[in-house]
Image (cartoon, rainbow, N blue to C red):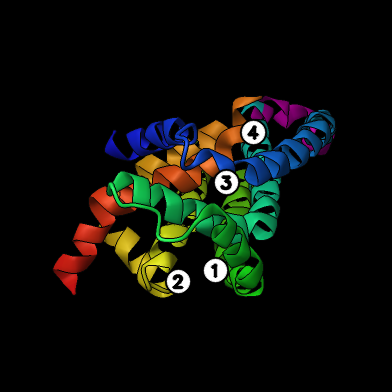
Amino acid sequence: MQGISYLLRGLKMLFHPRVRPFVAVPLLLNFTLFGVGFYYLFDLVGYLRAEVAAWLPGWLSWLSFLVLPTVLVLALLVIFYGFTVIANLIGSPFNGVLAQRVEEVAKGQPPIISNAESWMTVLKGAAQAIFNEIGKLFYMLKWLIIGILLSLSAIVSVVLAPLIPVLLFLIAAWLMAVEYADYATDNNGLRGRQSRTLLRRNKMHALGFGSAAVLMTWVPLLNLLAMPASVAGATLMWVEQLEKSWQQEA
């Protein structure tokens, strides 16, 4: 539950006067990309339903209630996570500054730099931020391959089929935690591998937060705030849980 609460509090944090100016760009990106994502999702669901029904022979048609949910969950995760990745790739320079401002507010610190200087930081750090995001993509690609293999196993195994959607959801939750915690950890000098190690030590918090982030991307209108809320929520998780854990292990 603790991990889930970070996202809800991150959503509330977006309306803080010192944070609000840095929400506009991520919000615009989400509005555009998730609008496109929903458009294609509705077409894809109908297509997959027809394809699964046509693929199964008549005497195995009863299996569609097992296979179809797995295929639909995989499609849902791929589409929404794919659009999330694109949004984060474009918005990564802004997300780093957003995480910095949320951390300052959460710790009761005065702004390290002014709003104008923050925007200059976005421009100067854009190339490095996008490079870091591409590095995360290679890590996530491994998990995407695992997800595809799990989905294929559901097609050939009736026993595994009911479990696969749950496993796919947990993979998506973990990747969301990795994605959004990286901004706060990077601001504090932790690189990708160090950030993931820290999340593994706090996996219940990470999975709770990631699960809430995944679910938020599935809720129409609310998902427009998913990216900035997740950045803010993961930053609160860093301030209240991850930073202490890192200091204890250091």
Marked residue nearer the N-terminal end (4 or 2)? 2
Q: Give the farthest residue toward the left.
A: 248
Viewed as shown, does residue 52 lie left or right of 107? right
Residue visible at 64% across and 45% down in the picture: 26
Mark 2 or 3, which is nearer the eye? 3
Residue type at the position of mark 2: Gly
Q: CA distance from mark 4 to mark 1?
A: 25 Å
Range of residues picked out in magenta: 54-64
Check disc 2: other Cα within 10 Å, few if <14, some if 14-19, many if 20+.
many
Helix, strand or loop at disc 4?
helix
Q: CA distance from mark 1 to mark 2?
A: 9 Å
Helix, strand or loop at disc 3?
helix
Residue at which label 4 appears: 224
Residue at which label 2 appears: 192
Mark 1 or 2, which is nearer the eye? 2
Q: Position of residue 105 (x, y in %)?
A: 35, 45
Q: Which mark is drawn over residue 22?
A: 3
Q: Position of residue 157 (x, y in %)?
A: 56, 45
Residue visible at 52% across and 48% down in the picture: 172
Mark 4 or 2, which is nearer the eye? 4
Q: CA distance from mark 1 to mark 3?
A: 28 Å
Q: Is residue 15 visible?
A: yes
Q: CA distance from mark 4 to mark 2?
A: 26 Å
Q: Which mark is drawn over residue 40?
A: none
Helix, strand or loop at disc 1?
helix
Residue at which label 1 appears: 139
Location of residue 145 (image quadrant): bottom right
Measured along the vertical axis of the image, is residue 18 above or below residue 177?
above
Measured along the vertical axis of the image, is residue 54 above or below residue 118?
above
Measured along the vertical axis of the image, is residue 216 above or below residue 78?
above
Quarter in which the C terminus is drawn: bottom left
In this view, the residue in front, 1 or 227, is: 227
